Amino acid sequence: MIFSTLEHILTHISFSIVSIVITIFLISLSVDEIIGLYNSSEKGMIATFFCITGLLVTRWIYSGHLPLSNLYESLIFLSWSFSIIHMVPYVKKHNNYLSAITAPTTIFTQGFVTSGLLTKMHQSEILVPALQSHWLMMHVSMMVLGYAALLCGSLLSVALLVITFRKALRIFSKNKNFLNESFFFGEIQYMNERNNVLLSISFFSFRNYYKAQLIQQLDHWSYRIISLGFIFLTIGILSGAVWANEAWGSYWNWDPKETWAFITWTIFAIYLHTRTTPNFESVNSAIVASMGFLIIWICYFGVNLLGIGLHSYGSFNLH
């Protein structure tokens, strides 16, 4: 009873804190950078991390096993993974571009955890025979950590695409206006207009130097985080194959969860390959990573809606 009450309190405290962090972050975006607000949001994410850590430890002690046996527990671990990723740049004193990604994803997952959709999974139960193995901690933790890192890296790639395409559209619009205007004027005025446009483009490029640097940083962090997530995902798939052989007598069964995990691994393997290909633009890699973002949610969440296959113990009902 005590552990259940403590778990309930920590769940709602972590959700409340991260909600406040989101509010502070939005305020800091609407005004000039305020160091006090930024530090408050960072401290809020640290407090969220400790609350979720306490929640996991409490449930671990209460249930007697690592809380990764169903969707509810894996979502808590996913929130914990997001908060871990958020703090890495903060600890290393880098500019935390991840805060715009990790804070909303944490509030999304924690909000789903506190919703009424997973009420039946709140109560800890005895593990089904297939999960009573030492591979539970290795396989599931690596998979969830991989999902968290890949989701963050993919969202950074989405942000890169948005900024890049907006910049390209703005330049295209300026050039189009220049061509429309120059059609009705003489050659001398055409030359003057062209010089003016070139000067304006030069000023525009200088003014958006920070944006170019931001794109470069987004690409850099996206690549590093996706690489880390890919390692976790690979370890998770390999350990899962060994576990499947022990439990079901086969390393691979083409279960829906296994199939989509393989598709996810393939997509991000293609992403990493494109990054090592000479003369391959970062935008193209970002498009592949953006596709991977949707694939991850299908693998992690969408397959659970089906409630079929060897991983059906992690499914839930919407009714």
Image (cartoon, rainbow, N blue to C red):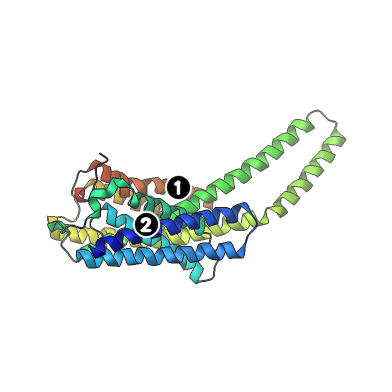
Q: Could you tell me which residue is drawn at 19 percent across and 50 percent down?
A: 313
Q: Secondary structure at mark 2?
A: helix
Residue 246 position within the rendered picture, expressed as x and y whole percent measured from the top left: 14, 61
**Residue 138 shows up from this direction:** no
In the visual, does 197 lie left or right of 75?
right
Going by the numbered disc 1, the residue's amino acid type is Ser
Q: Is residue 280 above or below residue 193?
A: below
- Mark 2 is surrounded, within 10 Å at the Cα level, by few (under 14), some (14 to 19) or many (20 or more) other residues, namely some
Relative to the observer, which residue lies in front, 98 or 2?
2
Which residue is outermost to the right? 188
In the rendered view of the protein, which quadrant contains the N terminus? Answer: bottom left
Q: Which residue sits at x=62%, y=62%?
A: 34
Examine the rendering and report whether any part of residue 242 can be seen: yes
The residue carrying mark 2 is 12
Q: Is residue 289 above or below residue 306?
A: below
Q: Nearer the viewer, residue 133 or 212?
A: 133
Quarter holding the C terminus is: top left
Residue 178 image point, x, y percent: 75, 36
User: Real-space Cα distance between discs 2 and 1?
Assistant: 31 Å
Give the image location of residue 36, x and y in percent: 59, 65
Residue plotted at (28% across, 66% down): 58
Dot 1 corresponds to which residue? Answer: 290
Q: Is residue 174 placed above or below 68 in the rendered structure?
A: above
